[in-house]
Image (cartoon, coloured by chain):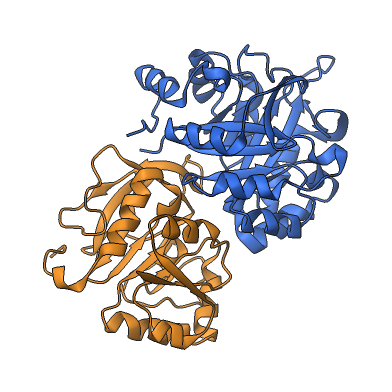
């Protein structure tokens, strides 16, 4: 039986793992290669490394960090941040990533999704969407808006529609971050995740808001997520993928328990 | 030991090479040097992406060279599209023939409410006698990402269930294939690659028959 994936996310700035609350108040959380290896050992199904400063500072992805992190990592490894062209993606793949995550650049030039997919396969393209509900809207879920540049700027697209377009262009997965919940540890945005998951035929990774095991149970159930991303819940030894998965298994969620 | 890895420009080889190096193998990558296939001790055919990319194996003359190596008894492992290529073909690219070492066709997952591609960690039901999957216990998982799959037949070494049962691994003597990505399947995947690297013909007969 296919299992629900628990994905450990490393937000990286200047070669260090950092964690912020709603994209601000950033604190140091260690070395990416060490952290990735630990998460994999403890049962994380996948590692995502997001270079959170790449886009707005115009820097390239940290190829050295990617190479160092990938070296001894034998679970799927996705890298995002600062990937603006198919050539950028090619360099990240060459450095050892299995997937790239594109966000701002894909909104600016949606053909980027087609281009990476054509060269490396749809399975290698994750389209990351930073979403924020519009509390003024009649339907805050359907009308949730896409944001770019680390949440600084409105993209002028609706989340569900953009997810559909990404799929049609050849994205293999959607990584949906609720910016309302990110770093708050108050739970995933299950309604928005379910709306996107029902709108597309590709896997949806829920992100933003993980704080308790119950939140994961909820997003896999009500939220119809195929995978869930966790960052702050794993940092500082709060919880390991292993203990999270053992509790999920007890709650009836199908997960891969580490050997 | 030395492994010849075939590059037919279908996706990225880095992960496969990294895993083989981790296990102590020396790798040689070729995208068309037939001499390297003729002298190969072991061959790995990776591959992510579209079945049509295997056309390059025909265009470069690698197809007959690999066929000859297999006939000589060289251990061969196809991964993902590399496994599918061992069959007669795939409905993903009907005009492109496979090696037809196995006579069946690969097909798209049946329509259902489940998502396709099948992405994630799934379990294996290993058939008794598989040498490639020796030591893989019930409850171990491997990582898949694919929309097309091979049917379950007498040569199937392991089945996985997603929408329907399909061949997660195929094995007949020195010719082996896995639909999943052993290079991305943690300790279980490395164990499977180690089995491939230590495969030798003298143990033949302990196989699936």
Residue B120 versus residue B82 in the image, above or below: above
- In the rendered structure, the answer to whether residue B101 lies left or right of residue A85 reads left
Residue A3 versus residue B32 in the image, above or below: above
- In the rendered structure, the answer to whether residue B125 lies left or right of residue B184 reads left
Residue A17 showing in the rendered view: yes
For the residue pair A131 and B65, the one nearer the viewer reads as B65
Q: Position of residue A150 (x, y in %)?
A: 80, 31
- Colour in which chain A is drawn: blue
- Colour in which chain B is drawn: orange
Q: Position of residue A86 (x, y in %)?
A: 74, 58
Query: Which image quarter holds the C terminus of chain A?
Result: top left
Residue B180 showing in the rendered view: no
Residue located 72% across and 52% down the image = A113
Q: Position of residue B11 (x, y in %)?
A: 58, 63
Residue A99 versus residue B171 in the image, above or below: above
For the residue pair B10 and B4, the one nearer the viewer reads as B4
Residue located 75% across and 39% down the image = A162
Q: Position of residue A199 (x, y in %)?
A: 64, 36
Quadrant location of residue A165? top right
Quadrant location of residue A157? top right
For the residue pair A36 and A170, the one nearer the viewer reads as A36
Query: Which image quarter holds the N terminus of chain A?
Result: top left
For the residue pair A78 and A199, the one nearer the viewer reads as A78
Quadrant location of residue B154? bottom left
- In the rendered structure, the answer to whether residue A160 lies left or right of residue A238 reads right
């Amino acid at each position: 039986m296919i299992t629900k994936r628990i994905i450990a996310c490393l937000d990286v700035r200047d070669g260090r793992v950092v964690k912020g609350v709603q994209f601000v108040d950033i604190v140091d959380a260690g070395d990416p290669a060490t952290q990735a290896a630990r998460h994999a050992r403890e049962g994380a199904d996948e590692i995502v490394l997001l270079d959170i400063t790449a886009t707005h500072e115009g820097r390239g992805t940290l190829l050295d960090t990617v190479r160092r992190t990938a070296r001894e990592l034998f679970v799927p490894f996705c890298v995002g941040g600062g990937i603006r062209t198919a050539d950028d993606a090619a360099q990240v793949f060459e450095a050892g990533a299995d997937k790239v995550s594109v966000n701002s650049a894909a909104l600016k030039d949606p053909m980027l999704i087609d281009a990476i997919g054509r060269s490396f396969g749809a399975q290698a393209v994750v389209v990351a969407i930073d979403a924020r509900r519009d509390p003024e809207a009649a339907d805050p879920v359907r009308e949730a808006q896409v944001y770019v540049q680390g949440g600084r700027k409105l993209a002028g697209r609706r989340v569900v529609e953009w997810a559909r377009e990404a799929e049609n262009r050849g994205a293999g997965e959607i990584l949906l971050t609720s910016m309302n919940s990110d770093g708050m540890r108050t739970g995933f945005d299950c309604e928005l995740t379910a709306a996107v998951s029902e709108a597309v035929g590709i896997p949806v990774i829920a992100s933003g808001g993980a704080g308790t095991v119950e939140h994961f149970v909820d997003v896999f159930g009500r939220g119809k997520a195929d995978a869930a991303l966790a960052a702050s819940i794993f940092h500082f030894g709060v919880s390991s993928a292993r203990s999270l998965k053992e509790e999920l298994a007890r709650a009836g969620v199908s997960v891969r328990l580490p050997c | 030991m030395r492994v010849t890895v075939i590059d037919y420009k279908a996706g990225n080889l880095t992960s496969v090479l990294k895993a083989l190096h981790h296990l102590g193998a020396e790798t040689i990558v070729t995208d068309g040097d037939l001499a390297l296939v003729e002298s190969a001790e072991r061959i790995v055919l990776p591959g992510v992406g579209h079945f049509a990319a295997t056309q390059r194996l025909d265009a470069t003359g690698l197809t007959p060279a690999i066929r000859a190596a297999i006939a000589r008894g060289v251990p061969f492992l196809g991964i993902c599209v590399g496994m599918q290529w061992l069959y007669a073909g795939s409905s993903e690219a009907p005009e492109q023939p496979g090696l037809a070492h196995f006579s069946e066709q690969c097909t798209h997952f049946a329509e259902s409410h489940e998502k396709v591609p099948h992405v994630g960690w799934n379990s294996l039901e290993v058939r008794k006698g598989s040498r490639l999957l020796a030591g893989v216990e019930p409850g171990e998982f491997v990582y898949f990402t694919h929309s097309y799959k091979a049917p379950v037949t007498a040569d199937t070494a392991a089945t996985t269930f997603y929408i329907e049962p399909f061949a997660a691994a195929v094995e007949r003597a020195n010719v082996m294939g896995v639909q999943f990505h052993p290079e991305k399947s943690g300790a279980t995947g490395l164990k499977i690659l180690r089995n491939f690297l230590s495969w030798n013909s003298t143990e033949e007969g302990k196989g699936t028959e």
